[in-house]
Image (spheres, grey):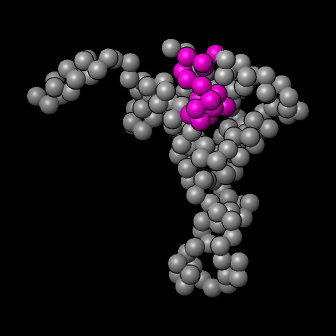
Amino acid sequence: MPELAISAEKVAFIIEKAREFDVKEAASDPDSGSNPSDDDAVDVLEDDGSDPVGQELGSFMIALNEDEQIDLVTLTWLGRGDGTIDDWDDLRARAVEARTEYRSPRRETVHYLLGEPMLGDLLADGLDEFGIDWTDEHLTADSSDPSERDEDEATKRR
């Protein structure tokens, strides 16, 4: 099993923020001038380019080191179905190669990731391929086989 250069905690943060960012939509109430309670607060989901969640997510990802950014791209591709966990090394090599095409690799990688529809879901699916449960409070990789998990569950119930 390959090792990730980025921690599951960081990926979980990105998943949560990306899902918040993904719910934004184009202007659906262009003539709005009323207060939010009159129009069911529909404007809160509009993407006007000044979304603080997008800015927070972008700032977080730009601060990652090169290997962490490469793993994010590779996890995205893995979650998208571009390969399996067995193809990790090849997918990662493609991500490294794609990065060499950028003038400003750090910024353009973030721009690429933010432009990926359903980024949070793709990253979550990528972590699933590793057997990592990102939703758990303590984020642990489940490396035990099913029989060990069943035995642990029986012990916990006693």
Q: Residue, x 70% and y 82% (percent of image)?
A: 31
Residue 73 in sight in this render: yes
Is residue 128 left or right of 102 when viewed as pictured?
left
Q: Position of residue 136 (x, y in %)?
A: 39, 36
Query: Is residue 81 within the magenta segment?
Result: yes
Chain part drawn in magenta: 73-89
Query: Is residue 123 within the magenta segment?
Result: no
Is residue 131 left or right of 144 when viewed as pictured?
right
Q: Residue, x 54% and y 31% (percent of image)?
A: 126
Q: Is residue 118 above or below residue 123?
A: below
Could you tell me what secondary structure mostly forms the magenta stretch?
A: helix
How many labels were placed on the picture? Answer: 0
Residue 11 in sight in this render: no
89 vs 4, nearest the viewer:
89
Q: Is residue 4 above or below residue 19?
A: above
Q: Position of residue 25 (x, y in %)?
A: 64, 63
Q: Residue, x 60% and y 19% (percent of image)?
A: 88
Q: Residue, x 54% and y 27% (percent of image)?
A: 7
Q: Using the rendered view, name the quadrant where residue 80 is placed.
A: top right
Q: Position of residue 61 (x, y in %)?
A: 68, 38
Q: Is residue 59 above or below residue 20?
A: above
Is residue 15 left or right of 138 when viewed as pictured?
right
Q: Using the rendered view, name the quadrant where residue 104 is placed.
A: top right
The residue positioned farthest toward the left in the image shown: 158
Where does the C terminus fall, quadrant-wise? top left
Is residue 1 left or right of 89 when viewed as pictured?
left
Q: Position of residue 43 (x, y in %)?
A: 62, 72
